[in-house]
Image (cartoon, rainbow, N blue to C red):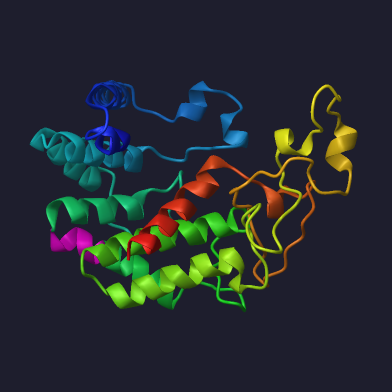
Amino acid sequence: AAMSIVFESEDQGYSQLLLSHAVQLYDFATKYRGLYNNAIKGASEFYESTDYGDELTWAAAWLFKATNLTLYLTEAEHHYMHFRLKERPNEFFYNKKVAGVQVLLGHLTQRQEYLDAGKAFCNFTVDHQQKTPKGLVYIDKIGTLCHAANVAFLCLQLAEEGISPAKYQKFAKQQIDYMLGSSGRSYVVGYGEKYPTQPHHAASSCPSLPEPCTWEDFHMDRPNPHILYGALVSGPDENDFYQDKRQDYIYNEVTLDFNAGFQSAVAGLRHL
């Protein structure tokens, strides 16, 4: 649904295709409720889902933004109450979208209830969330930078609503600057003078064909043969310590969801 909005002015046919599939997926998820990892065994080892209420609300809210059909807003607000999403979360990522739901509903409705919920989340993050000595928001040891980038992006969105813009924009810039080099190094592969050279990524750690790729290549202490330009690694620990070793996924994992909030926050800062 969100991507259908992006393509609406560029390719209406593709935009409508995306929207039709979004509606189908939402209808399916609404009818057949449950955790996907209960049906897809093994998924919980990598991307576990612990609830689905925030996803249903998130989907309905985006469908309302894409279609302007009040049916979807009504359902989003129903889900919000039914699944008790008024809480102040501590994070925003693929498995916990509550903060994003609050900010998005605030944007769509301009209702104080949602805007205040988003403000409570961002104020907690900026003022009280644990931080490393160099100022990085520290939420989880896996995807440290991902979590920081996600909340930076979300608070930038809230700033667009006129809520503490100077405070939230300053915070977002500090977090992204940390990732790009103000911390003493870059955490974006291929960017800056000192960046990760051993991201935990199969294809970039393999030699070029026709040479075979083996576990021996994985365990070699050398830069990956191919530079995975733009990838944001998992990041440092709570003391700003980072180890550029391919075998240690805690520091060097790279994923699509790690990059999602980061590049969105970068785009938001560029927009200022």
Q: Can residue 80 be seen in this snapshot? A: yes
In the image, residue 22 sits, relative to residue 107, either above or below, namely above
The image shows residue 146 at horizontal and vertical percentages of 53, 54
> Image check: 40 left or right of 66?
right
Residue at 29% x, 38% y is: 6
Q: Which of 18 and 191 is in front in this view?
A: 191
Instruction: Answer above or below: position of 114 versus 17.
Output: below
Q: Is residue 28 left or right of residue 37?
A: left
Whole-percent x and y of residue 126?
Answer: 42, 73
The front one of 153 and 117 is: 153
Please report the bounds of the magenta region as a residue range.
111-117
Q: Where does residue 46 sit, x and y in percent of width and height?
A: 60, 37
Name the residue rendered at 31%, 77% in the picture: 166
Query: In which quadrant will I find the N terminus?
Result: top left
- Where does residue 103 sit, x and y in percent of width and height? 27, 56
Q: Splitting the image into 4 quarters, where does residue 113 fall?
A: bottom left
Check residue 115 for magenta coloring: yes
Viewer-closest of 67 and 239? 67
Q: In which quarter of the image is the C terminus?
A: bottom left
Residue drawn at x 72%, y 44% as measured from the top left: 200
